[in-house]
């Protein structure tokens, strides 16, 4: 178990690379919209001292709406479109919290974000149990064999019985659910949680919606006050019966099975009221792993390797419309990152000086001087990085695992004002480089119409909104009746035949590579059979 000596993250303390790695935790919260992810994130940051008063995330959201008005779309639809990484310190640990968007149309982004995580918090609404989006995101986490810690939220409201919630997790997710604490009452009778491992009752004192660190009283099970609370809410017999039942399960705990994602420890609490959050955070930090080796095309790279390396999993433009800047988010995988250092982008062969870098601490952006494996840093990107790029201080390897997706929806982009054509191209190109959409043209030189492909319809709404607000271009997106795409390799004269094939449209991607869009499975199969000497690829063979 990794429990470094805490110092609150003072930079004056010297630590070895190994110690820095051991105290790092990099994770994401997965949940269905409305389960309380924003609230929990806010409370975690509160404990980490990154914000002083819970509620700031909401106000951060509010200021962002004011300054970055495309975020309005989030507010209108009540969804989280962007994802970001926040860093904070707690209890001697240095924590990187990756935010994943909850909406299903943004699963691409989530896949990539989880690639940068070492573990996952699965957040459930106690009244709802496993919801569709939880299930989807869980499957992504499982694909990556990430350890999963479960937090069942909103137990201050009428919830499903805790034993029912456990069996629902086990049944729906085929993972063993082992509770580490147990709620004392539920809904209006909720009085706190019982730590099954430490055998202590944590009784909470309600506050102004948990806007500060919660006051809690920790009592021993033998404490008469505890039994009077249990009898006061009429659950004494039932509570001890359940605890007896759960005690027999405690012996089943197996750290290795947890690391492989076969067992999930379960915690109960209320993020809004700050019940059980600190207890959960402390346990989570001790259970979850520090950064491990990452797979590359030359084998696993250990984080202790002294030379810096990492990969880019997200690109985001115009985070601050005042500056119109673009950042590439990099997960550090080995060695020490130092501001101003030179690294090689192995994918492009380019040497790059990494001088303008940011980390996000609650509401603040801060310059990064040094970073270690597990850390997420934002690199200022003048258009030189791509999702999936590997940067190394030394060595020619490429990290594996950043998936690319085939778009399934296509639109033709039209503009009312032809003089805005340049703006349109620039906007589309920048947004395409973030990875949310893919841009195609009807001719290799890109002179004619522009088409856009995406994995979900919502991306088009975001695109339209961003074009209008960030690039001042009013565009009409006309749906096209194609639903599958293949990148084509082979002799050019054969490829050009595709332009006259029924239900098939020949287009070109940003790198001028030929791509075919098909109206249906039948059209795709026809072309594949007719042209055996052509190669058909679901994603660009160059990525
Ligand atoms: P997100 O969509 O997952 O980010 O969810 P939010 O954090 O925005 O929360 C959704 C709603 O649930 C909000 O109205 C919260 O105030 C409420 N909520 C969050 N946590 C709790 C909790 O522990 N108890 C109760 N009663 N409500 C909560």
Image (cartoon, rainbow, N blue to C red):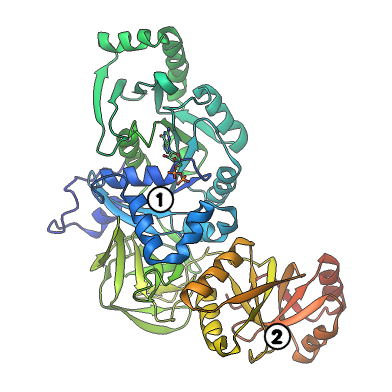
Looking at the image, is 260 positioned above or below residue 144? above
Question: Looking at the picture, how far across and down is residue 222, in whole percent?
Answer: 27, 10
- Identify the mark at residue 284; answer none if there is no mark: none
Q: Which element is circle 2 on?
A: loop
The location of residue 446, given as percent across then percent down, is 63, 89
Neighbor class of circle 2 (other Cα within 10 Å; few <14, some 14-19, many 20+) is some
Asked whether 459 or 14 is in front, the reply is: 459
Quadrant in which the C terminus is drawn: bottom right
Determine whether 307 is above or below 348 in the image.
above
Q: Position of residue 143 (x, y in %)?
A: 57, 51
Q: Are marks 2 and 1 in contact (CB under 8 Å)?
A: no
Q: Residue at 36% across / 70% down in the picture?
A: 320
Q: Quadrant of the N terminus?
A: top left
- Say if 125 sits above or below 374 in the image: above
Ligand 1 appears in which quadrant? top left
Residue at which label 1 appears: 27
Mark 1 neighbour class, 10 Å CA radius: few under 14, some 14 to 19, many 20 or more? many
Q: Is residue 527 left or right of residue 88?
A: right
Alpha carbon distance from label 2 to label 1: 42 Å
Q: Determine which quarter of the picture holds residue 229.
A: top left
Image position, residue 32 (x, y; %):
53, 44
Please tell me whether mark 1 sits on a helix, a strand or a loop.
strand
Q: Earlier in the sequence, mark 2 or mark 1?
A: 1
Q: Which mark is residue 442?
A: 2
**Residue 413 visible in this rendered orientation of the protein:** yes
Quick one: 65 or 28, which is closer to the camera?
65
Residue 499's place in the image compared with 521, above or below, is below
């Amino acid at each position: 178990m990794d429990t470094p000596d805490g110092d609150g993250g003072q930079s004056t303390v010297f630590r070895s690379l190994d110690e820095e790695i051991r105290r790092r935790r990099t994770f994401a919260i997965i949940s269905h919209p409305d389960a309380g992810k924003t609230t929990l994130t806010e409370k975690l940051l509160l404990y980490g001292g990154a914000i002083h008063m819970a509620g700031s995330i909401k106000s951060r959201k509010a200021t962002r709406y004011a300054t970055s008005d495309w975020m309005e779309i989030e507010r209108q639809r009540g969804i989280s479109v962007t994802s970001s990484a926040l860093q904070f310190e707690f209890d001697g640990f240095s924590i990187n919290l990756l935010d994943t968007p909850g909406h299903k149309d943004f699963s691409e982004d989530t896949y990539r974000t989880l690639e940068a995580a070492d573990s996952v918090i699965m957040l459930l609404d106690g009244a709802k149990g496993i919801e569709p989006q939880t299930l989807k995101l869980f499957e992504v986490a499982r694909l990556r064999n990430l350890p999963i810690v479960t937090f069942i939220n909103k137990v201050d409201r009428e919830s499903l019985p805790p034993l029912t919630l456990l069996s629902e997790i086990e049944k729906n997710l085929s993972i063993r659910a082992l509770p580490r604490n147990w709620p004392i009452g539920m809904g209006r009778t909720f009085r706190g949680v019982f730590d099954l491992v430490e055998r202590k009752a944590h009784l909470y004192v309600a506050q102004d919606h948990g806007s500060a660190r919660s006051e809690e009283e920790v009592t021993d099970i033998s404490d008469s006050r505890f039994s009077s609370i249990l009898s006061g809410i009429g659950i004494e017999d039932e509570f001890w019966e359940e605890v007896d039942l759960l005690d027999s399960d405690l012996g089943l705990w197996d750290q290795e099975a947890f690391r492989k994602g076969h067992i999930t420890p379960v915690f109960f609490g209320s993020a809004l009221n700050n019940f059980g959050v600190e207890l959960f955070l402390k346990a989570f930090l001790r259970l979850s792993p520090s950064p491990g080796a990452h797979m590359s095309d030359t084998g696993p790279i250990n984080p202790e390797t002294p030379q810096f390396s990492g990969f880019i999993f997200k690109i985001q433009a115009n985070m601050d419309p005042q500056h119109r800047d673009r950042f590439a988010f990099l997960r550090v995988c080995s060695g020490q990152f130092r501001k101003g250092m030179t690294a090689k982008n192995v994918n492009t062969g380019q040497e790059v000086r990494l001088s303008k870098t940011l980390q996000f601490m609650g509401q603040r952006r801060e310059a990064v001087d040094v970073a270690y494996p597990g850390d997420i840093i934002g690199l200022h990107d003048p258009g030189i990085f791509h999702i999936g790029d590997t940067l190394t201080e030394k060595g020619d390897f490429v990290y594996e695992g950043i998936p690319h997706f085939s778009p399934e929806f296509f639109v033709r982009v039209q503009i009312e004002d032809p003089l805005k054509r340049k703006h349109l191209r620039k906007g589309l190109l920048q947004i395409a480089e973030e990875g949310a959409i893919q841009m195609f043209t009807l001719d290799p030189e890109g002179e004619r119409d522009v088409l856009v492909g995406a994995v979900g319809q919502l991306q088009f709404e975001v695109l339209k909104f961003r074009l209008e607000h960030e690039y001042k271009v009013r565009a009409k997106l006309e749906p096209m009746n194609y639903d599958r795409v293949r990148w084509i390799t082979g002799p050019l004269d054969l490829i050009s035949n595709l332009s006259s094939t029924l239900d098939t449209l020949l287009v070109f991607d940003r790198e001028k590579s030929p791509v075919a869009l098909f109206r249906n499975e039948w059209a795709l199969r026809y072309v594949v059979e007719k042209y055996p000497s052509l190669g058909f690829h679901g994603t660009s063979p160059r990525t």
